[in-house]
Amino acid sequence: MPPPVRQEPPAAVHAAPNAARVQFNLRPRIRRGLAIGAAAALVMAFTGAFRTDQVPLAPRLGYWFSVIMAGSLLGLLITAAVQMWGRLARWRWLEMALAALLIALPLTFIVVVASALVFGPIAISLPTLLGFFTVVFPISLVMTIINITTAPVEVPIAAPLADVAESPAPDPPPAELPPGEPPPVEPLPVTMPAALAERLPPRLRAGRLLALAAEDHYLRVHTDLGDDLVLMRMADAVALLADVPGARVHRSWWVARAAVTGSRRDGDRLFLTLATGLAAPVSRAERPRLAAAGWL
């Protein structure tokens, strides 16, 4: 009797900029995944879900904790690997389906073993395994969709400047910000240029531009209506935004001035906080220029 699968949700950011040099902060993921898994195990055990009320509470707790926590750990590792791979970042449904499939395959065997230990011997055969899999996979897919679509935004840690300097074919440096007082901060930035908006899905075209983040050969366009990937170089996008008050704050980030609500530090790293809660990393090379223009 296969149980439901719990797994660790990935971050909202799908493919990290310069993925080979970007580190993800795994601690919030681990804490959140284990907390969700523990809560789910308690609920399943005390309700006797999937007819597990056939056994006493103590072995039932052990069964659900072993199965659900295994699913959580598998979900953490596999969804992070799929998202760092990044090849399906433009097709979120395919990305979630692949993650769920890769989770369900090993988890099916874990469920079979746990069920045999708690509920009695199970005759292992291909039909038996397929029967367990047909329950494990749909639940895994549903939980993957829920966790990915509801996960909070997680910002990658900026790459070291030395690594950026050694990368081939660097983009041209951004234009200097004009000196003097910064422009007044509006609640949200101006509407994005039509040449950029037309590359987005219809649901985002009327949105107001917050930031651009490079992800391999793509740009993630952040708006107040959501975000999506477009196939474009950062330098080309910045050229389209020449008339929009904003700046290249990092090799992989452009930020609209009116979207900035403040800044924060995390050790020696500096981030700009935006109106929607998004955080954009600021490179060390850009800090003096941004400070002189009143951004920091």
Image (cartoon, grey):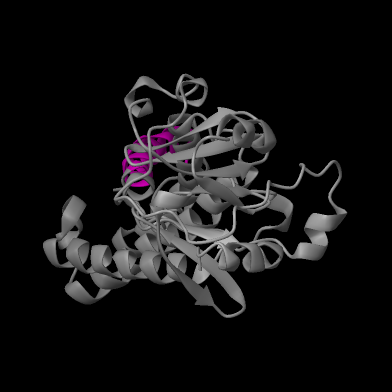
Q: Position of residue 273 (x, y in %)?
A: 43, 62
Is 12 within the magenta?
A: no
Q: Which residues are magenta?
A: 125-145
- Left or right: residue 175 compared with residue 98: right
Q: Quadrant of residue 286?
A: bottom right
Residue depicted at x 50% and y 21%: 199
Q: Residue furthest left?
A: 47
How many marks the image carries: the answer is 0
> Closest to the observer: 124 or 254?
254
> Closest to the observer: 146 or 170?
170
Q: Position of residue 94 (x, y in %)?
A: 48, 30
Can residue 278 be seen in this snapshot? yes
Magenta stretch: dominant secondary structure: helix
179 shown above or below 246: below
Residue depicted at x 46% and y 21%: 194
Q: Position of residue 149 (x, y in %)?
A: 34, 44
Q: Residue furthest bottom?
A: 267
196 shown above or below 244: above
Residue depicted at x 41% and y 22%: 201
Is 128 within the magenta?
A: yes
- Left or right: residue 284 compared with residue 230: right
